[in-house]
Amino acid sequence: MTFRRLLFVLTVLLIFDNSYGQLKVTGGISNPTFSNYLFGAGVKITNLTFNCSGANQYGTFNAQFTQLGIDSGILISTGTIQEAIGPDNQCCASVTVGTTATDACINAALGSPQSQYDPCIIEFDIVPQCDTFNVTYVFGSEEYNTGIGGYNDVFGFFVSGPNPLGGSYACQDFALIPGTNTPVTINNVNFKTNTAYYRDNHTTASNLYNDFQPNGLTVPLTATIPVVACQSYHMKVAVVDIGNPLYDSWVFLKFKSLSCAADQVLSVNLPDTTVCNGSGVILSATGGSNYTWSPGTGLSSTTGATVTATPTVTTTYTVSADMVGACIATDSVVVNVAQRPKVNFVPDTMSGCPELCVQFYDSTSVIGGIKDWTWNFGDGSTSTIQNPIHCYNTPGKYGVTLGVTSNAGCAATKSVPNMITVYQVPNAAFTYSPTSMSIADPVVNFTDESTDVYGISAWFWTFGDTGKSLQQNPTHTYSTPGTFCATLAVTNKHGCIDTTTHCIDVEPQYYFWMPDAFSPNGDGLNDLFGPKGEGITTFEMWIFDRWGQQIYHCTDMNKPWDGKVQNGSGAKCQEDTYVWLVELTDAFGNDRRYIGSVTIVR
């Protein structure tokens, strides 16, 4: 088979499947199922009974993909509900269930007693909470069209009870042709009479033909039944073969269509709601009078249209009230209680010196998880992360607050006053004496003048050279001139430290001296001529004889003149007086020049 032929076959099958056979029925249903399918809002049903010969005379139907005009509901029949399934390929589908009846309400609808066969009569007591209730239906029969005028199969909605216009209904039939008091029967609705409400189904031209067996069906009609709210009525829904048990009839009743058209509604202003533990919610009821609430636990009052509910656990509150017609209605609302978070947190440290950085850990417990966190650290700073780190820079005591909101929207906070202590830092200070000095007397006395609110517990000195001390008031001697920065670090009992530094100038010592004679005779005594001094950074010396001839020159104080001519000959100078010239730079950066004479004694 080619793909095109296969596609054609599948298309034909799909068209066939959707064109007829869509009516589905289920017989043998229970009373609760029947009730759930037929009865809607605003009616209270009791004493439901069935006067039908077989379980398959009534059941549920689904006509969603048909042209019936009613998607689903209850189906009752003088034969079986299975017979109603199309196509309409029999002229006179009929099942005789073998019973007869004499129902006064049926005879009243017909206007005279007539033979009744294969009845299916459903009876119940009904209390409506409104002044009008309705039921939507379609009537179909195999009596169409041959039985018209001869066999007037009938059905009806027969009501007995108080008439809102006065008096009482007694088997009052409300299955009427719209706008009339004429019952819907074979003779009253057909292809000749009241044709606007009739659909002929005995030929394939009908759009109902393939889905339904009845030769004719009405359009969907609605029975409107005026009543006195909250009063009790007896009602029959009946379908009966009249004249003979042949040619069955069916009634399709719309799903939950037997209901109040204008229901008196008692309602609470809120749907089921959630509150946080300890919070309340206002509940208001409308639609009635003389309101009573229960249970009383967590309620501001058990009476009145408006109450405040503050339950500690999830609670269903029910309100009852008097309605028009002396009936009582109820409504309920569930108030779910979500627990607030149990807020808790801990810091990794609670005290220290600035800058004190604290890691905070949230340990809140809550059902359902946490949506957000709000921290207040007591110093004007905040955070929205779960486990923040915060640094304190100013001494003092700080209270910490954590606010937590659960995923259910419940919020709670915890505050710990004075949780964090940031200690004062010492104020390091010292003096020294003398304030000016030279290397000639480089001894310095240091005096601690530090202050602290807790008291200083330790001192540590460095003097700018290699020296150190742990004494409070040390003395230090500098070994070389220069500028030395002495630092004092003080510690209080909480371990907080402060430092201070002063720089001290140790001036170098300067002096210069030259002898006026020497005896270079090799006896080891006074054999050399040169300067003595201190605080000299550069040096240069010249020796001249009396005629101005240079006989010696050096640039090193440690190379004195040995009394010989410095010209390569190394000749000894004779006894005489010689002139010397010295140029130097002292330790203070001053350039100096000295001239004098020296005598050689041999």
Image: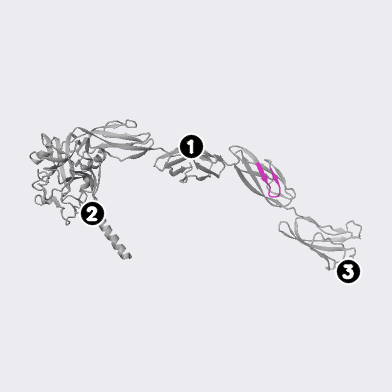
Q: Amino acid at mark 3?
A: Ser
Is residue 131 visible in the rendered structure shown here? no
Cα distance between the residues tagged 2 and 1: 78 Å
**Secondary structure beneath disc 3?**
loop
Indicate whether 104 appears above or below 12.
Answer: above
Query: Does residue 566 belong to the magenta stretch?
Result: no
Q: Nearer the viewer, residue 401 or 321?
A: 321
Indicate whether 311 appears above or below 518.
Answer: above
Q: Amino acid at mark 1?
A: Val
Q: Nearer the viewer, residue 457 or 44?
A: 44
Badge 2 or badge 3: first in the primary sequence: 2
The crowding category of the residue bearing disc 1, from other C-alpha atoms within 10 Å (few below 14, some 14 to 19, many at least 20), is some
Badge 2 or badge 1: first in the primary sequence: 2
Query: Does residue 465 belong to the magenta stretch?
Result: yes
Q: Which residue does the image show at 23% across and 56% down from the upper left?
A: 19
Residue 112 placement: quadrant: top left
Residue that mark 3 sits on:
569
- Quadrant of the frame with the N terminus: bottom left
Residue 20 - label: 2
Region in magenta: 459-469
